[in-house]
Amino acid sequence: MTIVLEGEKHLALVREKQRNFMTGVLLHIDFQVVSMLDKLRTNVALEFKGEALAVKLFNGILVTEMNSIEVECLPQDLPERILVDLSALKEIGSALYVKDLALPENVEVHEDANAVVVVVRPPEVEEEEEAAAAVAVSLAEPEVIERGRKEEEDF
């Protein structure tokens, strides 16, 4: 993007956006002037698209391990976001790794290629049953344990 300051044009990127946390209204934007000749290193958001068949067919739980990745490139090559196609997740336990991401040609990733981006976990049926049993035990009447000596009561 080009910003005009005091009559001069500068190439810039949005560095940070500040919003009111209650209303979501944009309060402030920080810009960073960049050189089109120097590479920059920044985080790019991941956007998850499609449907994981393992979630749909086997009631798997989709666990997102990463929401962004660190990349290095020239400003003109910087992607706004990187798409992650979830349709490849067809079985429980299947995962997508950094090496599986489709990146633009001139973008270099600064993350471990074998790092997990997203994985499908099995449904947590056993843990839910154990938690329900623990709640049932805690709702049962408590056992009364007497301590000390009994005092005689005078009527």
Image (spheres, rainbow, N blue to C red):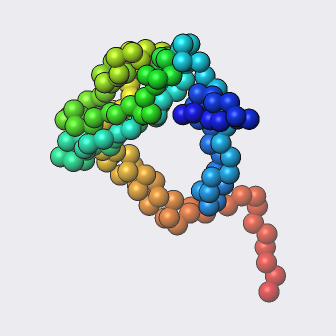
Query: How many dots with numbers?
Result: 0
Q: Is residue 102 depicted above or below 81 in this figure?
A: above
Can residue 39 be seen by looking at this rendering? yes
Quadrant assignment for the N terminus: top right
Q: Position of residue 8 (x, y in %)?
A: 68, 30
Q: Is residue 147 left or right of residue 110?
A: right
- Corner quadrant of residue 149: bottom right
Q: Nearer the viewer, residue 5 or 70?
A: 5
Q: Nearer the viewer, residue 9 or 55?
A: 9
Quadrant assignment for the C terminus: bottom right
Can residue 15 be seen by looking at this rendering? no
Q: Is residue 133 left or right of residue 20?
A: left
Q: Position of residue 79 (x, y in %)?
A: 43, 29
Residue at 67 percent across and 61 percent down: it is: 146
- In the displayed orientation, state which residue is furthest to the right: 154
Q: Is residue 96 depicted above or below 64 in this figure?
A: above
Q: Nearer the viewer, residue 121 or 42?
A: 42
Residue at 28 percent across and 35 percent down: it is: 85
Residue at 41 percent across and 17 percent down: it is: 107
Q: Position of residue 38 (x, y in %)?
A: 56, 13
Residue at 62 percent across and 57 percent down: it is: 25
Q: Position of residue 73 (x, y in %)?
A: 48, 17
- In the displayed orientation, state which residue is furthest to the bottom: 155
Q: Is residue 146 left or right of residue 11?
A: right
